[in-house]
Amino acid sequence: MNNKIKWIGGLMLLVNGTLVWADALPDGLIWETNDTDPVFASPQAKQGGTLNLYVDSFPLTFRTVGPDSNGSFRSFILDNQLRLISFHPNTGNPIPALATHWAIAPDNQTVYFKLDPRAKWSDGQPVVPEDYTFGYEMMRSPHIKGPWFNNYYTTEVVEVSKVDAHTIKVKAGSAKGKLDLLNTTELWPQPKHFYKLGPNWVKQYNWAIVPTTGPYVISEVKKGKSVTFSRQKAWWAKDDRFFKHRFNVDTVHIKVIRDQNIAFRHFLKGELDSFEMVQPTWWHEKAKGPEFDKGYIQKVMAYTDTKQGGQGLHLNTAVPKLADLNVRLGIEHAINMDKMIATVLRGDYVRATTFGSGFGPFTEMALPERGYDVQKARDYFAKAGYTKQGPDGILQNAKGERLTLAVTFTVSEHAKRLSFLKEEAKKAGLDLELNLVDGATGFKAMLEKKHEAAWLGWGGGGLYPQYWESFHSDNANKPQTNNFFNVADKALDTLINAYGKEFDLGQRAELSRQIQQRIYDLAIFVPGYELNYVRAASWRYVMLPTVPATKSTPGLLYWPMDGYPHSSGGLLWIDEDKRQEVLADKRSGKALAPLTLIDKSWQRGQGG
């Protein structure tokens, strides 16, 4: 793995067919690539066909930065933009993408990347160093109205510069370990020939179809109804080692269906090709009927070993009653998460105790679970002044104000879970007011900090936990940031600042554990659950490799795009011959053997 070439200074050398001056680079650089890690796509894959999927709301924008850009649809766009390098989904090693080689300078802070001279944007323009230097300027610009990006490209990435026609230099804000440094510096390019920065940038590019470096382009948009992606037949990287036999379907059609039950009916009719079934209700109860019994639809479950984001209740401390630690501690003990998991979720999920997990020593596993305890909850509520029980069983304070917590959520399927928690919370004198809001609109309300408690989960992307976005005071009491807690705590800030600058991985892991301890002490997050599997049903003609998922496959088993930070998607294909056979069998009523596949190749504890 990782072939290395020593760069000798002071010579004119041929690199990827281009002559460059070696003395434009520091002497002694060790250039690395990866052309030996195992492939994970199936050589049996066939190209062609259309994959029909759905989302529950139309995106508020096609931008991937700026206001309203951080919605779920963002992944379809961003995972179709390649970065300089990616990470192998099973080994975790860096692999080429837009860069063929990379070299870390002796300062452990600077990385040089050799751009693939074949790399092109979907409009035919070459990917050039200026796309990175412009991208650096763009991400620091106030015109994009993206405070997270402004900060990241000021503190985490402090320089992006051109070395020669195919080489760029990226410098991090501090020295880091190898993988951490590569993860910080493997940037997305921004097409300089397409964008123009200006005060109207957000509005101007709200629905722009931006050129892509990945395999698909947005080919059709029906506002409020659907978005269609089409595969570039002559995509420049289609035969590369880690891209070959991937991104096989010609078309990915994504329609908006706002109700999951209605979407399921579309799926049973064959109007959708796959249907996510992570939720126990769907897997255990609803995945039944003639389409399943006669084998036209298959069920697939694959265990993974992924990093988990925070899933649970985010308490907004800017709300006066939630500014009281005793109220927050009372809420912690009034939420019967364990029983909800055991009953509503059929024990499929695992109770979490931290904001994110699966990061090895970066996760504080010693944090005790704050279990459901009615008496403890009432004791804490009493300390906050809620001492009188009203006729409905809900506690009141001296002013007669009821103890309520408005919970904003965006997934209708979660209503049953929250309704169960609501009934259990009543026993502790707490009334949960459940507010279901449309996906994109609900997330926007959370970004605008218009919630008391937000029920949601974050992806576990990245090689290490990220805290600044969600917990630093820089992002408190501001719209369009991920600090849904509005927490502004000096001790937490100090730890997060030190974490961002620490080079030694052991010390950084220790700081991470201290951060998680402080979050726990502040009681601003009620941990929910985590899961390490992907589950879906699909029509039998949707094909997958023998091992259907990678170690790092994200939430959608049939994810058609690439993925971040691991290159893990695009493994499926449509077998058109089998499709015709299955549909003919369905029309004639011929039964096939029911098919349920459960793969444990990457199950934790199985050795992977």
Image (spheres, rainbow, N blue to C red):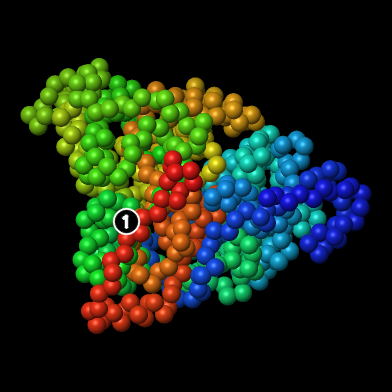
Q: Is residue 27 above or below residue 534?
A: above
Residue on which disc 1 sits: 277
Q: What's the residue at 84%, 43% (across, down)?
A: 28
Q: Is residue 74 above or below residue 215?
A: above
The x and y percentages for residue 552 are: 49, 50
Among the 4 quarters of the image, the one containing residue 583: bottom left
Return the residue nearer the eye: 256 or 556. 556
Q: What's the residue at 32%, 43% (across, down)?
A: 349
Tell which residue pokes out farthest to the right in this image. Answer: 10
Q: What's the residue at 28%, 69% (across, down)?
A: 593
Q: Is residue 163 left or right of residue 530?
A: right
Element carrying mark 1: loop
Tell which residue pokes out farthest to the left in this image. Answer: 391
Q: What's the residue at 44%, 44% (across, down)?
A: 606
Q: Is residue 587 left or right of residue 358?
A: left
Amino acid found under the numbered disc labelled 1: Met
Return the residue nearer the eye: 549 or 316. 549
Q: Is residue 97 above or below residue 245?
A: above
The x and y percentages for residue 486 are: 41, 33
The reply to whether residue 475 is in sight is: no
Q: How many other residues sit within 10 Å of disc 1, few (<14), some (14-19) or many (≥20)? A: many
